[in-house]
Structure formats: structure tokens, C-alpha cells
Image: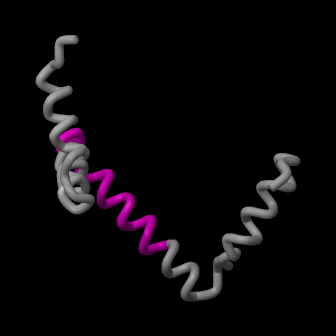
């Protein structure tokens, strides 16, 4: 069986500690990220600020995760 360079790297990475594997994974994932679009980032920041304001002012109401989960299960007719 011929091992590729990627196979050798992966084999070596899997022998590392949890912390080192997490560092490797983080670096690999970050290397896949496209350059940041400043307009999109600003739009998301505005949306986040608006949602926080709505929650703080009482204009929006949060729903506990347990209730949301139960609604999803009921709507999907799925047994837990």
C-alpha cells in the first residue's frame, strides 16, 4: 500500500495530544477560510447589535432551548 504525504501527515497528527490535534485542526480549518468580506461582516455586526437591542428592550423574547427542542420534536413527529 502506497501512502501519500497526506496519509503520513494525518497518521502523525493523530498520534499527538488532544491539545496539539486541536491546534492542528484549527490551523487547517483557518487555512480554508476565504478572505473576509468587510461589508458582510459589518452587516452581521449590525444584525447582532439589533438582536441584542431587541432582547434587552423586551421587543423580542427568548425561548428556552428545551421548549424549542420539544416543539421541533412535536412538529417532526419524532420520538426522543
Vertical arrangement, residue 8 with respect to residue 40, above or below: above
Please tell me which residue is depicted at 16% across the width and 40% down the height of the picture.
Answer: 12
The magenta segment: 30-50
Is residue 48 inside the magenta stretch?
yes
Q: Is residue 36 left or right of residue 66?
A: left
| Residue 69 location (% of width, % of height) | 73, 62
Q: Quadrant of the N terminus?
A: top left
Q: Residue furthest left?
A: 5
Front residue of 4 and 65: 4
Q: Which residue lies furthest to the front in this view?
A: 1
Q: In this view, does 16 lie to the left or right of 53?
A: left
Q: In this view, does 72 lie to the left or right of 18?
A: right
Secondary structure mostly seen in the magenta stretch: helix
Front residue of 16 and 51: 16
Please tell me which residue is depicted at 88% across the width and 47% down the height of the picture.
Answer: 77
Q: Quadrant of the C terminus?
A: bottom right
| Residue 72 location (% of width, % of height) | 77, 55
Corner quadrant of residue 46: bottom left
Colour scheme of the rendered structure: one colour
| Residue 31 location (% of width, % of height) | 17, 42
Is any atom of residue 63 visible in this view? yes
Instruction: Count the labels in the image.
Output: 0
Is any atom of residue 30 visible in this view? no
Is residue 39 inside the magenta stretch?
yes
Amino acid at each position: 500500500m502506497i501512502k501519500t504525504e497526506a496519509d503520513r501527515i494525518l497518521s502523525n497528527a493523530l498520534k499527538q495530544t488532544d491539545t496539539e490535534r486541536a491546534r492542528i485542526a484549527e490551523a487547517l480549518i483557518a487555512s480554508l477560510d476565504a478572505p473576509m468580506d468587510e461589508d458582510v461582516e459589518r452587516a452581521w455586526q449590525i444584525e447582532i447589535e439589533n438582536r441584542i437591542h431587541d432582547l434587552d428592550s423586551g421587543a423580542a423574547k427568548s425561548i428556552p432551548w428545551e421548549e424549542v427542542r420539544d416543539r421541533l420534536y412535536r412538529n417532526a413527529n419524532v420520538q426522543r
